[in-house]
Image (cartoon, rainbow, N blue to C red):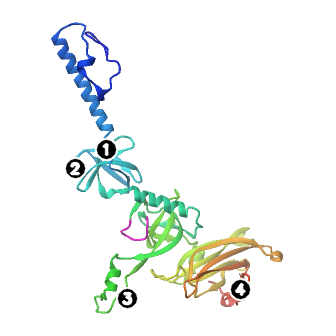
Amino acid sequence: MEVKLGEVKLGEVNLGEVNLGKIVKLSYPSHLCRRALAFALAAVFLLGLSACNRKGRRVLEVNYVSAGQATLRDQVVTIYNRVGTVKNGERVEVLEREKRFSRVRTAGGIEGWIEQRYLVDQTTYDGLQKLTQENLSDPVQSPGVLRNDTNLRLTPGRETEHLYQLSAGARVSVLKRATAEKQPGASALAKSGGKTSGGKASSGPALEDWWLVRDAQNRVGWVLSRMVDIDVPLEVAQYAEGQRFVAFFVLNQVQDAGKEGGDKKISQYLCAITEPHDGLPYDYDQIRVFTWNVRKHRYETAYREHGLNGALPVTVTSENFDKEGTLPVFILHVKDDSGNTSERKYKLNTPMVRRVLATGEQKQTPKPATNRRRR
């Protein structure tokens, strides 16, 4: 580097290898100029070194924001300044940790302190991405609407890890069902011969149902079932008879020329139903097929089957049956007493529902609704 008084020429300087004694030459042998220039170069060196330290600060790990929105503060004290905000799912780099807080850096370079409870680690993020990929193409069992703000969890359970938050009113697609202990640790009490407050032996931990759902952004996770209202059409939901709709599907549509004074297509439905209790050993225990009576302009129960140890998913498709033509088909997965799962196929040739037997399967008499009364 060449330096002249009145005309400073720095050239290219590697701040990690600066040697002032070797690189500084003065055109005028003035000790005052040498001192001033030394101070100037030292200042440039320190500024550059500070910048390098900021950029090169060691990153402890990568985290993701699990809160809907969180504040970044300049210091970990009661009174602080807000230096920025981060949103749900945002990636941040953790630089420091102090008690309940982490100092993070955003993708935009903003640094600040955030409460650790608003962060999840890379393992949780990767787990939710894997869960999404594994269930991205699963058939939808029913659409639903969230009652409240809800977390998408990695596994069923109130204390399990979560990342994304969904807002009340968000629409989701229900894919699967599972159960989890309502109060983690209750199973240990049961195994140790714990008793209820009434002095009776505990029969085991209380269980609650969870739904695996997919949201509008194709993110998949587990939510508490009671937070989801299954969006069953009102004209069918009115026939619940105190039971809980688990899943429902449109099998086909029929034409009703006299409906509301005009030609209209009406959907016919398959519904999977169960008792209104959590923790049951099956996903559903009965199915009902609702067909439309074009003469009376109303829904009727064309088929009902009880006593099923049904497991989701239910599959709906269509198939060609020669003389009958192409008909709607639905396939159930049913477990026997040994826990083995088998498939049962049914076809709808309105208004009749019949089993489609597999090769070697014995013929069984279906259970049509009595007198096909309105239900």
In this rendering, the count of numbered labels is 4
Report the span colored magenta.
154-160
Residue pushed farthest front?
Answer: 22
Above or below 253: residue 187:
below
Residue 271 coordinates in the image, percent (x, y): 60, 77
Identify the residue position indicated by label 1 in the image: 58
Rendered residue at 80%/76% (across/down):
324
Residue pushed farthest top?
Answer: 28
Identify the residue position indicated by label 4 in the image: 361
The 10 Å Cα crowd at callout 4, few under 14, some 14 to 19, many 20 or more, is few
Rendered residue at 59%/63% (across/down):
137
Looking at the picture, tell me which residue is in the foreground, 46 or 343.
Answer: 46
Q: Mark 3 and mark 4 in contact (Cβ < 8 Å)?
A: no
Residue 106 coordinates in the image, percent (x, y): 36, 45
* Residue 31 is one of the magenta-drawn residues: no
Q: Earlier in the sequence, mark 4 or mark 1?
A: 1
Rendered residue at 54%/63% (across/down):
134
* Residue 159 is one of the magenta-drawn residues: yes
Identify the residue position indicated by label 3 in the image: 203
